[in-house]
Image (cartoon, rainbow, N blue to C red):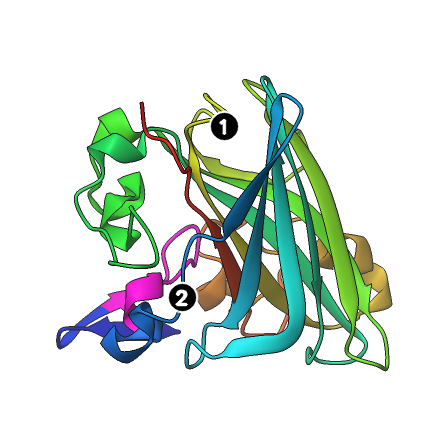
Amino acid sequence: MSFTISGTTKWYVATGFVAIAAVVGVALVTALGGGTAEAAGDNKVTHSNVYRFADGSEVESAKATLVRSKSGVTTTLNTDQLDANTGYTMWWVIFNDPRECENPIPGLTTCGESDLLLFGGKPEINSSVLFAAGNVVGGTGLVSFGAYLEEGVLPTGNGQVTWGPGLVDAKRAEIHLVVRSHGPVVPDIEEAQISSFGGGCTEETDPSGTGPAGSFACVDHQFAVFVPHKLK
């Protein structure tokens, strides 16, 4: 599977994460944002809408929340309009030092696809892509994800770390959440379909080879964005 930016075709490589800039478009930039924030003691709570990769439109009944503490981040994402009886994973896409990013999308992000290390981003950004959570969507199309990520701690499962140091600074990192489809549940590989990047995917959509491979062209369906409100 591929996508096109400015007439140039790029393959999904290792992560398969699409530039939000490519799917949102200029018309939607002013409507989207890094969420609203509120204080909760020493923690910062940020809320974000959830959007479709296909066209950048909002999933009307969906919401995501990120809580930043001194040593980690906690997130919940509740969404719907997904495929029934299908395995999905949610991924942390982390830009640890967004001050170093050079490809913002005004009104939406400080960092874009080209700021990811895999796509030529500066090493100083310390970008990371890590597994956050997984679940099977039932017949209603509704699903909830919840995850916690501590600074300096990486997930240990097969196919759960694509690259990067993990979360370095919980207060300052820009964090995107990506919901990825792994196809209709296959009993023999169901666990992998909700716990790894490549579970159930074709070789073309899992070039990292983290499998077990399947016949489904895995694709990123939805995303949320959390931009830190103070870049010190």
Answer yes or no: is residue 203 visible: yes
Res 150 → quadrant? top right
Q: Say if 219 sits above or below 166 in the image.
A: below
In terms of depth relative to the viewer, which is nearer, 147 or 1?
A: 147
The residue shown at (25%, 48%) is: 119
Disc number at residue 166?
1
Contact, CB < 8 Å: mark 1 with mark 2? no
Amino acid type for the residue under numbered disc 1 = Gly
Q: Residues within 10 Å of mark 2 (few under 14, many from 20)?
A: many
Q: Disc 1 to disc 2, how far (Cα)? A: 26 Å
Q: Amino acid at mark 2?
A: Leu
Residue that mark 2 sits on:
32
Q: Is residue 21 magenta?
A: yes
| Residue drawn at the location 56% of the way across and 20% of the way down | 151
213 displayed left or right of 15: right
Q: Is residue 205 left or right of residue 232?
A: right
Q: Over which residues does the magenta segment extend?
A: 10-22
* The N terminus - image quarter: bottom left
- Residue 17: image location, x then y, percent: 42, 58
Q: Quadrant of the C terminus?
A: top left
Q: From this viewpoint, is residue 159 visible? A: no
Pick the front one: 88 or 62:
62
Q: Nearer the viewer, residue 207 or 52?
A: 52
Say which mark, if any, is on residue 204: none
Q: Main secondary structure of the magenta part?
A: loop
Query: Helix, strand, or loop for circle 2?
Result: loop
Nearest the camera: 33 or 94?
A: 33
Q: Is 226 placed above or below 85 here?
A: above
Q: Quadrant of residue 79?
A: bottom right
Residue 125 within the magenta-colored segment of the rendering? no
Residue 89 left/right relative to 218? right
